[in-house]
Every structure is written in structure tokens, then in C-alpha cells.
Image (cartoon, rainbow, N blue to C red):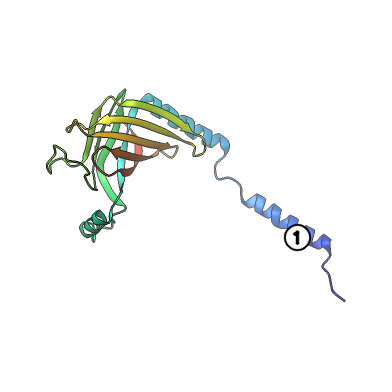
């Protein structure tokens, strides 16, 4: 004869486990706190008086650039896929946007630069500007197109995702080079 565990004891055990999980899995932030943080972020973006202090570069690498960058980055704590930087920024002041960013990657088309000022520099009023709220990520996505400051032929399509934690992911698609990404902190402009 088989010995069966009473259904009642199994039910009680499952009820205790489920209630313990429900109690221990409370959200880290309340909905009100998330809404407040998102509202603060929206105000900051709409005031258009801030900068993104770039601290990380994430290049799009081909096999050739990966080999070169890994040799250049040896013993620095960086890799070809993630490079820590400082002193680079994107500034928003009224309707004008300016940026001074490093570039690691391959140039696809000829340019007027000839090995000087190889970074990404732009300044002016952007074209095709849009700002959308991303409901799934609790973030905002800004898109715009702007021309290079020194090379009038090169154009940048910029996508910036702003997060309530005062961080931003920047993706730049260029007309003459491989794309590149950056990460940075939002800061007030004095």
C-alpha cells in the first residue's frame, strides 16, 4: 500500500512559499518615485540647458580596428569594445546643440580632414529634431541630424536615450564613418 501525503499539508506548504515570495519581491521603487524621476527628467530635457558628460565610448569595430585598438589599449584597463574617457561632452543650450567627442573606428569615405581633428565635432541648430517618451523603458529618446563643424560634407544622425538616473546613451550614425556609441551623465550647465 502506498503512503500518500495529505493534500492539505501540500496546500499549506505552497501557500507559505507563495506568500514569502510575494513579501520578499516588493518593487525597489514605488510607482510615485518613478513617475517623479521621469517628470524631473522631462523638465530638464525641455529646459534645454544641460550637458552630457561623456565617460564611456563603445565603438563599432571591425576585425581590423579591434586588433589595432586592443594593441593601443594594452595595459590601460580599456578594451576595443569599451573605452573610458573624460573631457568630452554634448551641450544643449536653448535651440543649439554642440558636441566634442572622440572617434575610434574606420572612415568609410574620403574626407577633408587628412589626419587632423579626427573626432566628432558639431555645433548649431539641429535638423529633424524629435523627442519621444519610451513607455517601456521609462526613458526619453531624442533624435536629430546635424552637420560636422569643420567638414561640411559629413552629417551625423544622433540618437540619445535619457534615463531618470541622469544617464544617457548616445548613438551616432555618420555619413562617412562607422557608427559609434557613448555613455554619459547629465549635468546642469552653469
Residue sitting at the far bottom: 1
Image point (43%, 27%), residue name: 43
Residue displayed at 57% across by 39% down: 30
Q: Quadrant location of the C terminus?
A: top left
Q: Quadrant of residue 42?
A: top left
Q: Is residue 11 left or right of residue 28?
A: right
Image height of 28 relative to 33, above or below: below
Residue 77: which quarter of the image? Answer: bottom left
Q: Which residue lies at the image location 19% right of the left edge and 30% below the top edge?
A: 152
Furthest-right residue in this view: 1
In the rendered view, would you say 150 is above or below 12?
above
Q: Quadrant of residue 79?
A: bottom left
Q: Quadrant of the N terminus?
A: bottom right
Judge left or right: residue 88 versus residue 185: left
x then y, percent, for residue 115: 13, 44
The structure residue drawn at horizontal position 73% and vertical position 56%, both measured from the top left corner, is 16
Secondary structure under tag 1 reads helix
Give the labeled residue for mark 1: 13
Q: Residue furthest front?
A: 109
Q: Position of residue 170 (x, y in %)?
A: 34, 39
Give the answer, above or below, for where 117 lies relative to 147.
below
The crowding category of the residue bearing disc 1, from other C-alpha atoms within 10 Å (few below 14, some 14 to 19, many at least 20), is few
Q: State left or right for residue 8 relative to residue 73.
A: right
Q: Is residue 108 left or right of residue 158?
A: left
Between 90 and 32, the residue placed more toward the observer is: 90
Residue 138, percent from left and from top: 49, 37
Name the residue furthest top: 95
Residue 131, how many percent across, how many down? 41, 28
How many discs appear?
1
Amino acid at each position: 500500500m502506498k503512503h500518500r501525503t495529505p493534500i492539505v499539508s501540500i496546500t499549506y506548504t505552497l501557500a507559505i512559499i507563495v506568500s514569502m515570495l510575494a513579501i520578499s519581491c516588493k518593487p525597489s521603487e514605488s510607482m510615485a518615485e518613478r513617475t517623479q524621476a521621469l517628470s524631473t527628467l522631462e523638465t530638464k530635457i525641455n529646459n534645454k540647458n544641460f550637458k552630457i558628460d561623456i565617460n564611456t565610448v563603445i565603438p563599432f569595430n571591425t576585425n581590423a580596428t579591434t586588433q589595432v585598438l586592443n594593441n593601443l589599449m594594452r595595459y590601460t584597463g580599456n578594451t576595443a569594445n569599451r573605452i573610458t574617457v573624460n573631457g568630452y561632452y554634448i551641450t544643449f543650450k536653448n535651440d543649439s546643440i554642440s558636441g566634442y567627442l572622440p572617434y575610434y573606428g574606420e572612415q568609410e569615405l574620403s574626407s577633408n580632414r587628412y589626419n587632423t581633428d579626427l573626432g566628432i565635432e558639431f555645433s548649431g541648430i539641429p535638423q529633424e529634431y524629435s523627442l519621444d517618451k519610451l513607455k517601456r523603458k521609462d526613458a526619453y529618446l531624442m533624435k536629430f541630424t546635424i552637420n560636422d563643424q569643420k567638414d561640411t560634407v559629413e552629417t551625423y544622425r544622433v540618437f540619445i536615450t535619457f534615463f531618470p538616473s541622469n544617464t544617457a546613451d548616445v548613438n551616432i550614425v555618420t555619413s562617412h564613418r562607422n557608427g559609434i556609441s557613448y555613455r554619459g551623465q547629465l549635468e546642469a550647465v552653469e
